[in-house]
Amino acid sequence: MVWAIERHTKLLGSAVALGWMTCCSLYDAALLDDAEGSSMAGDGDGSGGMALGGAENPEPASGGEPGSGGDGSGGECPLGDCCPDDPEKEDPGQCGCGVPDDDTDGDLTADCNDLCPNEPTKTEPGDCGCDVTASDEARCSTLKNGIIHRYSFEGSGSEVSDSIGDQPGTIENGGTMSDGVVTLDGSNQYVSLPAGMISSLTNATFEVWFTWNGGSDYQRIMDFGDTTGSPAQGYSYLYLAASKLNGGPGSGFSLAGNAAEVATDAPDVLSTGVEYHVVLVADEDGAAFNLYINSAFQNGIAFTGSLSSINDVIAYPGRSLFEADAYLNGTINEFRIYDVALTSSQVAYSYAEGPNTDIFE
């Protein structure tokens, strides 16, 4: 009787245990199905989700190539998706997950890495900004880094500001300044600048946009130096004139008065009432003294002089150091001085930019 009871109890315990194992196995299988279905849902980019047992938000490791798994090992990302949280991308590309690889200017550099996203020839601004193409960057950079004085004749009254070198000038005897232009009537009006502006230079370029309204020869666009005698005559000087001896514009350099002057002149007389771009280059290192009009080379001579030898106590745009010469009858739009000798290519670039360029801003 006792034996029968013990056998019945053992059979009942086995049945309960078997039922529990069956129940739990079915329950575990259901949990596994739910987890697997959740992990395979994906990010909506058609690549599927991560594999079972993967991290919740896997990111490709730095140094990996796109589509390689992001770890540089050459393996594939789980189910081919290295950006599981970005529905638009399956690999980081140039910009990484979550950032589109847009290339606005089509230069094969994504906007996220392109500091000039609208200029296809540049990926960084350089000295002159993104609006200047890569082919013009060197020429623009020389102008921007070489300019030391710029007179744009903005404002009103008699003070002329220097936006680069902070050496302001004064309009003398009633000349007027309006809309970025100073007007001189040819009687006694001129601009006076501070002393000592060019004697500290080795190489220099003088650039002006001006309009000549006619009159006698040797009207000065500019004249730097000192005088001697009475009536006064230039002794050590550098000048640029609107016309010379019924000819075109020209220059003069001397350290001992008119008899020792060397010059470089243009052959053609300027038309009156027309704005011209005139550039004089004094290149001591290159031993050249060159004249350009509207970017075209006019004439040049060997230059063996030295700007440092000029006693530039006087600086006159619009007036001659020679008392007998007439004052300038015309207008000056812009006057610049550089401490470099511009090349013909750089002169052409500046001419194309014009007097109101923003490359110096």
Image: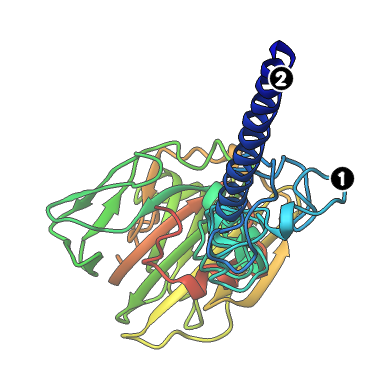
Q: Nearer the viewer, residue 32 or 119?
A: 32
Q: Quadrant of the N terminus?
A: top right
Is residue 24 shown left or right of residue 77? left
Residues 257 and 116: in front is 116
Q: Furthest-front residue in view?
A: 1
Query: Above or below — where is 266 with respect to 227?
Result: below
For residue 290, side relative to residue 68 (left or right):
left
Residue at 47% x, 71% y is: 353
Badge 1 crowding class, 10 Å Cα cut-off, few under 14, some 14 to 19, many 20 or more, is few
Q: Nearer the viewer, residue 155 or 25?
A: 25
Coordinates of residue 186 in the picture (x, y in percent): 24, 70
Q: Which mark is residue 4?
A: 2
Can residue 115 be seen? no
Residue 18: percent from left, percent from top: 68, 34
Residue in the foreground of this view, choosing between 148 and 273: 148
Q: Is residue 229 above or below residue 332?
A: above
Query: For mark 1, what is the residue?
Result: 73
Amino acid found under the numbered disc labelled 2:
Ala
Is 195 placed above or below 40 here? above
First of labels 1, 2 by sequence position: 2
- Is label 1 in contact with label 2 (beta carbons under 8 Å)? no
- Cα distance between the residues tagged 1 and 2: 68 Å
- Residue 81 locus on image (x, y percent): 68, 57
